[in-house]
Amino acid sequence: MAIADVTVGGEFPGLLARPLDPESAEWVRSLTGTPAEREAAAARLHEVLLRIARSETRRRGDLRISGAELDDLAHQAAADALMAIASKVGQFRGESRFTTWAYKFVIFEVSTKIGRHFWRHPTVALGTEDWDRLADRFGLDPALEPEWRDLLDALHRAVDEDLTDHQRKVFVAIFVHGVPLDALAAKLGSNRNALYKTVFDARRKLRSVLVASGHLDNGSSR
Amino acid sequence: MNGPEKLDRFLLTDPQDVGCEQAMDLLDVYVELVAADPGAAARRYPGIAAHLAACGPCAEDFAGLLAVVTAATS
């Protein structure tokens, strides 16, 4: 089921749980075992999650966070991921290895925390709209401005006149001001899926308007 | 690619795109498939492949998990 049809949810037919591999089975057994077993397994898992959180923050780079602040973010991500895993281990269906399933949570936590952290040192001012930034973001060559100026102006008009207030607010924040989607979700008290759906619908509507006005060719539409 | 083509590509939406929630629900499964055979993963889950091609944040999570899984198995 595609996002065009639904906002959230849906199923993938044919995806069946398989018997757990021995390592995954041992993780599940120990994380649901006696209090002592659970504590020992949680400590082992936390160590791995913290290592992954640190490597993931390094891999992403250019976060404008460093040193103790970055390490604190990694610690928080590992701790929150461990809590999520502990509360959801009963839902693990063995469709992947347990470790891959568990590592997913710490990657998500790193994303969420980086999004929230954006507003501690925001690099954008949301008050003034500079639509020429959109040209920069799309790598439009200033030397070829006659090629794209009319289209960019038409896009600006369509954003103002054809999007809902919410679609416009989200579109402008992300594409004109350059606010990361996860950071905007944190600021609006929303979530990534909801904002992506908003942007998806806005893009579809804008393209439809620009095709109708003759600024874009319908031929390349999928 | 010229300016209009770049803007057009940005505005194009893929009807197969499953959205963030479904893609992230199955990210662990998809990543293991990609690690084994990228082509097979995209063929089995075209909606996830379409989503990752369009959603920067989910693509970043995918790249992070794939890096961990690849490092763990190499």
Image: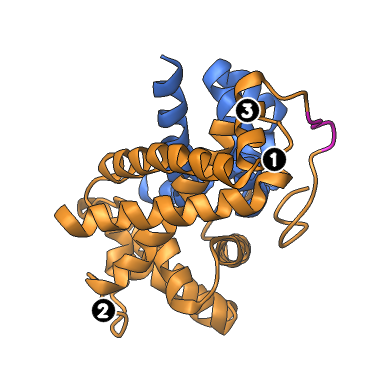
Chain colours: A orange, B blue
Looking at the image, residue A44 lies above or below residue A209: above
Which three-letter amino acid code belongs to the residue tagged 3? Glu
Upstream in the sequence, badge 2 or badge 1?
1
Identity of the amino acid at label 1? Answer: Phe
Residue A59, x across and y down, in percent: 29, 39
Total of numbered circles in the picture? 3
Among the 4 quarters of the image, the one containing residue B45: top right
Q: Which residues are magenta?
A: A13-17
Residue drawn at x 55%, y 75% is A167
Q: Are marks 3 and 1 on the same chain?
A: yes
Query: Which image quadrant: the C terminus of chain A?
Result: top right
Image x and y of residue A184, in percent: 43, 70
- Residue assigned mark 2: A125
Q: Earlier in the sequence, mark 2 or mark 3?
A: 3
Q: Are marks 2 and 3 on the same chain?
A: yes
**Up/down of A35 relative to A197, above or below:** above
Task: Please tell me whether residue A15 belongs to the stretch shown in magenta.
Answer: yes
Q: Which residue is mark 1?
A: A92
- Measuring from the top left, give residue A24's x and y in whole percent: 63, 27
Q: Which of the labelled discs sits on residue A26, or is there none?
A: 3
**Residue sitting nearer the eye, B1 or B55:** B55
